[in-house]
Amino acid sequence: MDYRLRLALFCPIVVIFLQLQATTANDRNIELNSFQALAIDDSWVDWDTLRLKKKTRMEMGLTGDVNIKQNLGNEQLVSLQIHKHDRENNRRGPLVFQTQKPFCKLVESLKSTYDGMVEASNLPKKFECPFPKNTYTYKDYVLDTNDLVKDIPNGDYIIEAVLKHNGKPVSVMLVDVTVSN
């Protein structure tokens, strides 16, 4: 068979396959099972009325107040861990992702997310380090989770974000989610 004919037959099959893959990747669901924000050391953060709520299949909304009681800089670290959740035994499973970054460097790396949060809150328009202490109010900030779950296998997960000062946890956020098609 002539290579041009093979190419003409093969290309539409590849295009259809890629389109099906894109459709499948976008047809994801993230279910929020629980959200907890805990202050380990009350002199750093008071989570006050901050709540994370499911809005649509792929969106979660952040609403409420959080009181940052001390300026946050690169001296404070943010540790992020994602574990599979063994729901049957109600315990953490294997670690699937882990990172730790200085607070300001983390926020600077998430500039587009920060800019979106500014629109739905009283955060400072321009991020500067150290981040100033204040009570910040979020009103229906929509976190688009599409990019978060597109490459994650179906399953139950616990996401833990820990704010640390001098190596010790001062505040924790725990989010329990289920990712599915």
Image (cartoon, rainbow, N blue to C red):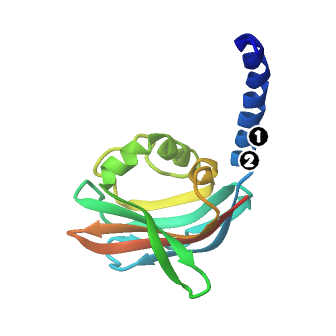
- In terms of depth relative to the viewer, which is nearer, 130 or 17? 17
In this view, the residue farthest toward the bottom is 89
Label at residue 30: none
At a point 39% along the width and 43% down the height, the residue shown is 109
For disc 1, the marked residue is 20
Q: Position of residue 40 (x, y in %)?
A: 36, 80
Q: Secondary structure at mark 1?
A: helix
Q: Relative to residue 67, is residue 51 drawn left or right?
A: right
Q: Residues within 10 Å of mark 2 (few under 14, many from 20)?
A: few
Q: Locate residue 149: give its quadrant.
A: bottom right
For disc 2, the marked residue is 24
Amino acid type, label 2? Thr
Q: Locate residue 140: give its quadrant.
A: bottom right
The answer to whether marks 2 and 1 mark residues whose Cβ atoms lie closer than 8 Å is yes
Compared to residue 55, the image places residue 26 above or below, namely above
Q: Secondary structure at mark 2?
A: helix
At a point 72% along the width and 30% down the height, the residue shown is 14
Amino acid type, label 1? Leu
